[in-house]
Image (cartoon, grey):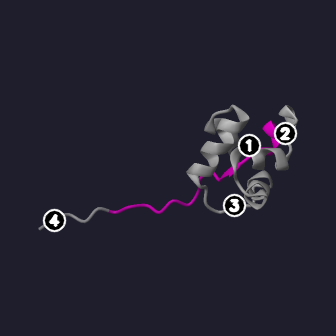
Amino acid sequence: MSKRKDYKELTTYDIYFVDIKTIMNSKGISQNILSKITGLSINTIRSYYHSNIKRIDLDVVSRICKALNCEIKDIIISK
C-alpha cells in the first residue's frame, strides 16, 4: 500500500513580463530598426515592446537580446 502525498496548490507567485522598451529607449533604437536588425515582423516587435504577449518565444527573445546587446535577465522582469 503506497502513501498518498498531499500537495498544496500555488496561490501566490511572481508575474513576469518582457520589458524591451526601457533598453530600446536608452539606446535610441526604434521598433522599425529593431525589426530590421532582427528580421522579426514589426507586429512581433510591437507586441514585445508593449509587453502584450502571453507566451514568450525563446527564438524571438534571443534575437532581441542579440540586437540590443543585452541578456535575457535584462528584459524579463517580475512584478
Compared with 2, 40 (above or below) is: above
Q: Kindly indicate whether the residue at mark 4 contacts the one at mark 1 (C-beta within 8 angstroms).
A: no
N-terminal-most mark, 1 or 4: 4
Q: What's the residue type where badge 4 is placed?
A: Ser
- The kind of secondary structure element at disc 4 is loop
N-terminal-most mark, 3 or 4: 4
Q: Which residue is mark 2?
A: 29
Indicate which disc residue 2 carries.
Answer: 4
Position of the N terminus by quadrant: bottom left
Q: Kindly indicate whether the residue at mark 2 contacts the one at mark 1 (C-beta within 8 angstroms).
A: yes
Q: Residue at x 69, y 41 (%)?
A: 75
Q: Nearer the viewer, mark 3 or mark 2?
A: 2
Q: Which residue is mark 3?
A: 53
Q: Which residue is mark 1?
A: 37
The foreground one among 69 and 55 is 69
> Circle 3: is it few (<14), some (14-19), or many (20+) Cα within 10 Å?
some
Q: What's the residue type where badge 3 is placed?
A: Ile
The residues colored magenta run: 6-24
